Image (spheres, coloured by chain):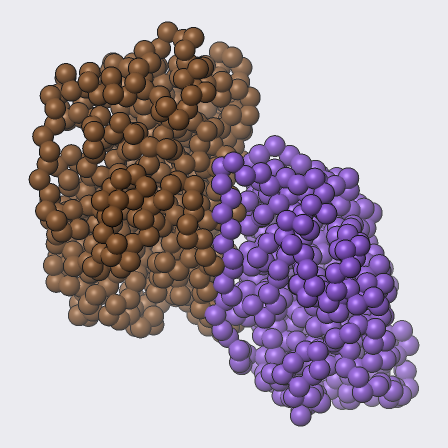
Chain colours: A brown, B purple
Amino acid sequence: MNNYIERDIPEYIEGYGSVVPFNGAYQNSIVKRKTSVKESSVGPEDKKILESIDEALDKVDIKDGMTISFHHHLRNGDKVFNMVLEKIAERGIKDLTVAASAIFPVHAPLVEYIKKGIVTNIIASYISGPVAKCISQGGLKNPAIMQTHGGRGRAIESGDVKIDVAFIAAPTSDDYGNINGLNGKSACGALGYAIADAEYADKVIAITDTIVPYPNCPIEISQIYVDYVVVVDSIGDPEGIVSGTTKITKDPVGLKIAKMAAGVMEASGLIKDGMSFQTGAGGISLAVAQELKDIMIRDNIKGSFASGGITGYIVDMFKEGLFQYLFDVQCFDLKAVESYSTSHKHQRMSASMYGNPHNKGAVVNKLDIVILGATEIDTNFNVNVTTASDGTIMGGSGGHSDTAAGAKLTIIVSNLMKARLPLIRDKITTVNTPGETIDVLVTERGIAINPRRQDLIEKLKGTNLPIMTIEKLKEICEELTGKPKDIELKEDIVAVVEYRDGTVIDVIRKS
Amino acid sequence: MNNYIERDIPEYIEGYGSVVPFNGAYQNSIVKRKTSVKESSVGPEDKKILESIDEALDKVDIKDGMTISFHHHLRNGDKVFNMVLEKIAERGIKDLTVAASAIFPVHAPLVEYIKKGIVTNIIASYISGPVAKCISQGGLKNPAIMQTHGGRGRAIESGDVKIDVAFIAAPTSDDYGNINGLNGKSACGALGYAIADAEYADKVIAITDTIVPYPNCPIEISQIYVDYVVVVDSIGDPEGIVSGTTKITKDPVGLKIAKMAAGVMEASGLIKDGMSFQTGAGGISLAVAQELKDIMIRDNIKGSFASGGITGYIVDMFKEGLFQYLFDVQCFDLKAVESYSTSHKHQRMSASMYGNPHNKGAVVNKLDIVILGATEIDTNFNVNVTTASDGTIMGGSGGHSDTAAGAKLTIIVSNLMKARLPLIRDKITTVNTPGETIDVLVTERGIAINPRRQDLIEKLKGTNLPIMTIEKLKEICEELTGKPKDIELKEDIVAVVEYRDGTVIDVIRKS
């Protein structure tokens, strides 16, 4: 069958189950009750500190077929995931589902566990590196499930993903499981992606390398959710924890795109007192933030909040009073960590509060402008940030679809050529974000506005910005790159791409 | 049947149901799964601000038999409870259950609604004033249910109390339902008692008199839990919000008791670096805090945390570095509100985090010493703070049973005579806190130690404190007051006293 955006999806997928097809960004077809969580009673005499991960695995009675979860705040410096999987593997456990908020190159040992049938299901919002390659080549027994950040919160809260044991890498913890990410040798700041895991897993194990006296204030994850605490030598490598990508681009083409995007934002009328803004940590996105900063200072504009993964650039704008508040789901650098630990106005949010479409209103709903990237975009403005143009998984939506659905103005900024391949295509390899939630595409050669946004087209008419149809922009793109060859993918489905509401927006086939 | 502490309780109570008898403070006989909560989807276009309480009642489709909830952070200055009930009463709704964290004299209009059958069930942790009198006299159709603060959190989380609509008095809210109690004309500080209501009610309505720009940081109750926001002229009377009882006693007898209690604490060995402490806001309890303060300064002791409802006296100790952290479920005065709003180390806790025995470890479990009061105590150390000696309801456990069960050392401080009646009796009117969780009784004429605590008896032998058996203390007491007459109560059960784990520890009969 074809879903709402004409992607060909089976009604039933082996190893996934029945498909609820994507039916439009605001249909919310499957709102349900939240799942019920097992109560546990910890009395005054009970201790939570355990000697080792092995002891914790005994305590939670780890067994075949369980779902275990991890968060990715330590990014490519994370050691906890591998440490836990190694101990589980030694036990001959089979058929685990790994629900990780993201999987990075550092998690390469997982490939071995996949091959051995120890891990047969993977659910994540972003997958890159050897695990992504392994999945793309059909190495995983069942299709991986790709979710958005908000969609992961939704899935965990609704019980679509029922976590048996959550392992929480804790930069600091006290002996009763109060956790924060502010301090310790593996400090990473806000722990927004781990909240649903802590709240909805039946068992929660904190793994820390920095035990602090009780109580570990400010408390990000409370003792009332944590069963056990295990102290290890090191949970992470600081080099890998702080993201390396948070630098403004120096490429003149990128800077040109950023300036054009700023022009669109200005013309939209949304740059005004009380505005809210989010941008990614990519080089062009950060350049857009820089442009916005200049405009806000020039026009003396005081914004309301900036949100997302927070970078030092955004903290600077916050400190200069351009934004009064920050909503932070993860800190990208030490400047963000420092700000988060010192100001009440730098507010932590959970992934669910950030982008879950089935709670009582996520922060993305309050966003005026979001700046996003794209690997590919089709002429209906559907976007792919999940697979490379050869079909290999190399990322995932993360908060892409969530913010696009929520924001009043969603702008994609991108070079027309990506690794010598065309950005704009008739049909893209994978869709993770539907075109109905994308308003504008800004490239170095021109700007295309989604025809659904006639209001924006009107507003931009009076400017000297190079507005054109996306079809025209595709032509220019193909003049540069040539027409892309159709890629040959096999029939086998290696991953299912869920939209934030849990419907299936696309599938990824074996490459 | 008789329960574990020999209270005579029916197996089935009309209007309450089957009784699970109290079976010991640490048996936790009925740990279950948490209840599942209805998901709601609020999209980018949806607004939450409504024109009036009436519009909110329409939106949530209020109807016969529903359970509605309120919190008591505005104490005897609360206007929200009456405002909402008045509007509901106008609709001819019947058979409501009111789950209020506490009911004060200001809630007197409820008596009328009880008489009319609009409200037929009441669940609360503390009831005083005309409503208490009405219940005691058999005015309520079904028995009221008295819970502890932690027990209320447990009941709501487990679904024993399933709230259809929670009404949250919000000192400040933004248009998306982010709430805090720090500011506004009805500022009351931490909103710990409202958290379970927000998280577990199917519908949540914030009622505020101070709407602030989005986002209302720091956020105490998140937008993800709030369906609607109603703005009214005033939610509270500041005179009634700040408690009037938080003054150290000037009575020499009270001060003597406090000094003796301090002697017990010293002898126990628990006054040392890293200690934790809680005391109530009563005059003698605060005098004990003052004694402790002097000892800590004298011996240069740095405590870990103080917890509970926080008063200015405790804030002073925090600011002087005697405690490094405060765990705050409610602020008793403006000094506490101010401290809470300025320090990360003054940490909010929910009622569940405070005292729920069925989460993964409440803060009370980490308490070293708690100082509590008593209206009556029996020779098994069972305590009553719920009814007067004539059987009339005039209070309730609140956090009494929770802290007593958690703390390493639970000390009751009280005059031997209470309104010319004896404190110590063979059989007390009502038991809310079981004797097995009480360690010491300190009165002006002597100190009794629970025989379960032979370790303490040993430690106190070497002191010059007037240690004696509780039987001996009862004799002294009766010399002062005479032997109390048995009171005549009718058979009808007007209230059921639940222990924190949901078992029935006692019943209250019509007076």
Q: Relative to the observer, which residue lies in front, A352 or A177?
A: A352
Q: Residue A78, image x and y in percent?
A: 27, 48
Which residue occupies the extreme bottom position in the image? Answer: B1
Residue A73 placed where, x, y %?
33, 45
**Residue name at image x 70 percent, y 73 percent:** B145
Q: In this view, does A284 lie above or below A330?
A: above
- Residues B437 and B487: in front is B487
Which sits in the foreground, B273 or B70?
A: B70
From what the image shows, is residue B511 above or below residue B121? below
Judge from the rendering whether residue A57 lies leftward or rightward of residue B356; answer left or right.
left
Question: Quick check: can you spot residue B121?
Answer: yes
Q: Quadrant of residue B166?
A: bottom right
Q: In which quarter of the image is residue A419?
A: top left
Across and down, in percent, residue B173 comes to 64, 40
Q: Quadrant where the C terminus of chain A lies?
A: top left
Residue at 49% x, 11% y: name it. A298
Identity of the residue drawn at 9% across and 30% down: A485
